[in-house]
């Protein structure tokens, strides 16, 4: 039975050494997920995620796979407990950036092997860009203010909004000189946070066009099926069903910004009452809780939290049966 719950899947940035170790130890379903992804990508993801070192885990290709493996392991644990696919429980699923692949696998749109391989290739191609680029965060300004600040990049290089995570929270991608000029102006305009991120890849902007071309070639060779429950596209901030559109959206996601704030704004109209974050950290949980106080949020960043989520789902199912 589908409750009005959204399952959200994080992208890069929440990873840490030790993530998923407890799940791997206690649940056979989690062990299978890590082992299957390791086999698909020829990397020992359990060893890297549990033991590091941090420098190895934080390389772009490994970070993406580690976060993906952790999310899939949690999905498998929940599915094993209830004896049904997660798409039979979730009303809607959505991932942030990399999390799009975790969500697409969870809605049975992409097989595990294909999704793992695509995640690995995506990170590889994104990291092959120029070395004078990066990303930056601005918090405390409106979208109009940030868009106006982008004009300061003229003559200094390219920059664009790559993630709109909340009404006043933005991530920018671009060339370093342009980003530095914009950040200086953002501080002068009263931004609470205006700082560079420790990321050398200008994700989700036009500078990723070469990577998008390479990803298109691989995506055209992968079977993509219609999602078994509602799935949001980062690129359009809309529900998407057609396999052709999903394939195109994953290519466009390389060069287009993540419209997370717009996606969250649609949850109340869908009568979403519960949000579960599936993967490391609780970044998306905090964003949803801060944006929509009426939505109960939970994350799964420990064995205890996974058990709490399972208990909450059971209670929701029991309540639905009595109504």
Image: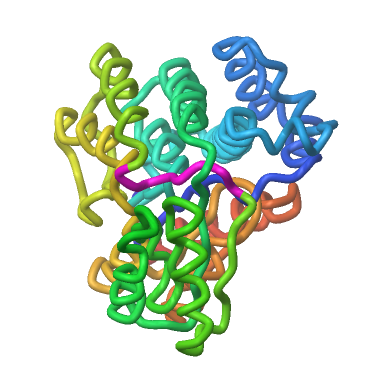
Res 309 quadrant in image? bottom right
Instruction: Tell whether position 51 is magenta.
Output: no
Residue 32 placement (x, y as % from top left): 64, 20
**Up-down: is 158 above or below 60?**
below
- Residue 155 pos. (x, y %): 33, 60
Tell me which corner region of the image, top left, top right, bottom left or bottom right, holds residue 107.
top left
Tell me if 180 is positioned left or right of 228 in this view.
Answer: right
Q: Quadrant of the C terminus?
A: bottom left
Expressed as whole percent of the image width and height from the top left, the position of residue 227 reads 26, 35
Task: Name which residue lies at 51% across and 83% down.
Answer: 191
Q: Is residue 81 visible to the viewer in this orientation of the structure? A: no
Residue at x-position 47% and y-position 79%: 186
Q: Is residue 200 on the magenta stretch?
A: yes
Q: Residue at 37% across / 46% down in the picture?
A: 204
Q: Position of residue 197 (x, y in %)?
A: 60, 57
Task: Name the residue at 27% across, 33% down.
Answer: 251
Which residues fall within the magenta stretch?
199-206
Q: Nearer the viewer, residue 196 or 314?
A: 196
Residue nearest the observer in this picture, 171 or 50: 171
Residue furthest out toward the front: 155
Q: Main secondary structure of the magenta part?
A: loop
């Amino acid at each position: 039975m589908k409750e009005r719950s959204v399952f959200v899947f994080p992208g890069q940035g929440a990873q840490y050494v030790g993530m998923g170790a407890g799940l791997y130890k206690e649940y056979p379903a989690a062990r299978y997920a890590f082992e299957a992804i390791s086999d698909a990508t020829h990397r020992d993801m359990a060893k890297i995620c549990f033991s590091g070192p941090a420098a190895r885990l934080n390389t772009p290709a490994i970070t993406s796979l580690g976060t993906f493996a952790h999310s899939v392991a949690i999905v498998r644990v929940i599915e094993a407990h209830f004896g049904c696919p997660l798409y039979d429980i979730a009303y809607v699923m959505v991932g942030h950036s990399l999390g799009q692949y975790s969500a697409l696998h969870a809605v049975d749109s992409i097989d595990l092997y294909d999704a793992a391989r695509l995640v690995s290739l995506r990170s590889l191609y994104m990291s092959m860009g120029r070395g004078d680029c990066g990303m930056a965060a601005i918090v405390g300004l409106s979208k109009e203010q940030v868009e106006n600040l982008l004009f300061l990049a003229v003559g200094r290089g390219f920059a664009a909004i790559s993630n709109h995570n909340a009404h006043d929270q933005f991530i920018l991608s671009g060339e370093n000189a342009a980003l530095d000029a914009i950040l200086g102006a953002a501080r002068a305009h009263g931004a609470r946070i205006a700082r560079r991120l420790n990321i050398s890849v200008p994700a989700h902007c036009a500078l990723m066009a070469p990577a998008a071309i390479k990803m298109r070639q691989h995506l055209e060779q992968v079977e993509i099926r219609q999602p078994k429950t509602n799935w949001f596209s980062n690129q359009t901030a809309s529900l998407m069903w057609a396999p052709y559109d999903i394939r195109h959206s994953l290519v466009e996601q390389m060069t287009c910004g993540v419209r997370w704030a717009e996606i969250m704004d649609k949850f109340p109209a869908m009568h979403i009452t519960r949000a579960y974050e599936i993967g490391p950290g609780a970044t998306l949980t905090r964003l949803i809780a801060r944006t929509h106080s009426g939505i109960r949020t939970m994350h799964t960043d420990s064995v205890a939290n996974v058990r709490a989520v399972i208990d909450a789902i059971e209670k929701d199912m029991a309540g639905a049966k009595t109504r």
